Image: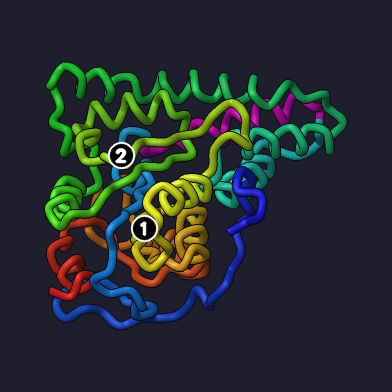
């Protein structure tokens, strides 16, 4: 892990993303590298958006147009289509880190084009207001009971959490989304009861939170090391952090829009490159997965 635990590193490819693993018989569970810590897991770290929650599915369709709007305002001669491609590239490159990192990059891009950027926190607030306008109907439907939680959960999420808790594992949730909203949305989805280890999210101060800091806290408070750590995520940050800590990182290459049960090809390639040991499309086969990982 980074010596400065509050700083989230950029994506680094540490293994060939085109590697093809072996599949557990009759399943969609792909083993890229056999874990060294079979059956020893006691602490389990989960990412939130895209790993468990689908409430914010489609967020790039809000962020990228917003960025193009501000880039066009610089008077650049680039077309809207060109700027959209540029924004999509750096937004996806930074996906997995706290949202503010993407806004810092937007400010840099505006500077490059001779514009005067706003405070990145202001861009983040504008983005969040637009995103909430998009997802408020989903949140309201969950709060009223009109929509069941399963409609906005990665398939099998509750089953895997129940199974892990029943095995005596302590679960933790860490997200690059602001902590206040992670707490709210985890409650709407009925997930909070499973995270005895705590729910952590982004803070205004970038250095006040990172997933690496959560892992370090797990180690220090429980007097354990990475051999007892299992991690699930659809972003490169948690995959890199769990692997660097000596744990077992499982990539959740979720198809957020269609919930097809097939891995998203872009996510799979990125997460394998980041060092994932296993790849799953969702948690529908969690019983098979945990039987493999825990050796029973």
Q: In this view, does 219 lie to the left or right of 46?
A: right
Q: Give the range drawn in magenta.
A: 57-75
Q: Disc 1 on helix, strand or loop? A: strand
Q: Earlier in the sequence, mark 2 or mark 1?
A: 2
Residue sitting at x 32%, y 77%: 31
What x and y, as percent, mark residue 157? Answer: 20, 48
Inspect the magenta stretch and tell me whether residue 64 lies in it: yes
Residue sitting at x 83%, y 27%: 115
Inspect the magenta stretch and tell me whether residue 52 lies in it: no
Q: Is residue 148 left or right of residue 202?
A: left
* Distance between mark 2 and mark 1 Cα atoms: 19 Å
Give the residue number, with chain letter if any, for mark 1.
231
Give the residue number, with chain letter if any, for mark 2.
54
Residue most extreme to the right? 114
Residue sitting at x 27%, y 69%: 40
Residue most extreme to the front? 223
Against 160, residue 13 (above or below) is below
Mark 2: few, some, or many residues within 10 Å (few <14, many ≥20)? many
Residue sitting at x 54%, y 76%: 15
Quadrant containing the C terminus is bottom left
What x and y, as percent, mark residue 4? Answer: 66, 49
The colour scheme applied to this rendered structure is: rainbow
Q: Is the magenta stretch mostly helix, strand or loop?
A: helix
* In front of the other: 110 or 15: 15
Q: In which quarter of the image is residue 205?
A: top right
Q: How many marks are shown on the rendered structure?
A: 2
């Amino acid at each position: 892990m980074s010596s400065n635990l509050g700083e989230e590193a950029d994506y680094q490819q540490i293994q060939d993303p085109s590697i093809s693993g072996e599949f557990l018989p009759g399943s969609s569970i792909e083993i890229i590298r056999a874990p060294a810590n079979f059956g020893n897991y006691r602490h389990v770290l989960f990412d939130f958006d895209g790993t468990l929650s689908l409430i914010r599915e489609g967020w790039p369709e809000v962020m990228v147009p917003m960025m193009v709007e501000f880039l066009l305002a610089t008077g650049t001669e680039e077309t809207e289509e060109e700027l959209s491609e540029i924004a999509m590239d750096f937004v996806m490159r930074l996906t997995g880190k706290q949202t503010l990192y993407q806004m810092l990059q937007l400010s840099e891009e505006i500077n490059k084009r001779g514009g005067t950027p706003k405070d990145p926190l202001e861009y983040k607030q504008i983005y969040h207001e637009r995103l909430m306008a998009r997802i408020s109907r989903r949140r309201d439907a969950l709060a009223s009971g009109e929509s069941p939680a399963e409609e906005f959960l990665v398939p099998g999420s509750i089953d895997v959490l129940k199974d892990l808790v029943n095995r005596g594992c302590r679960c933790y949730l860490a997200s690059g989304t602001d902590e206040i909203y992670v707490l709210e949305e985890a409650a709407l989805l009925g997930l909070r009861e499973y995270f005895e280890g705590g729910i952590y999210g982004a803070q205004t101060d970038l250095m006040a939170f990172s997933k690496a800091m959560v892992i370090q806290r797990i180690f220090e408070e429980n007097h354990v090391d990475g051999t007892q750590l299992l991690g699930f995520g659809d972003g490169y940050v948690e995959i890199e952090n769990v692997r660097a800590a000596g744990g077992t990182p499982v990539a959740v290459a979720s198809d957020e829009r269609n919930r097809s049960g097939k891995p998203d090809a872009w996510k799979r390639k990125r997460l394998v490159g980041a060092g994932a040991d296993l790849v799953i499309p969702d948690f529908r086969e969690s019983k098979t997965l945990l039987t493999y990982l825990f050796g029973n």
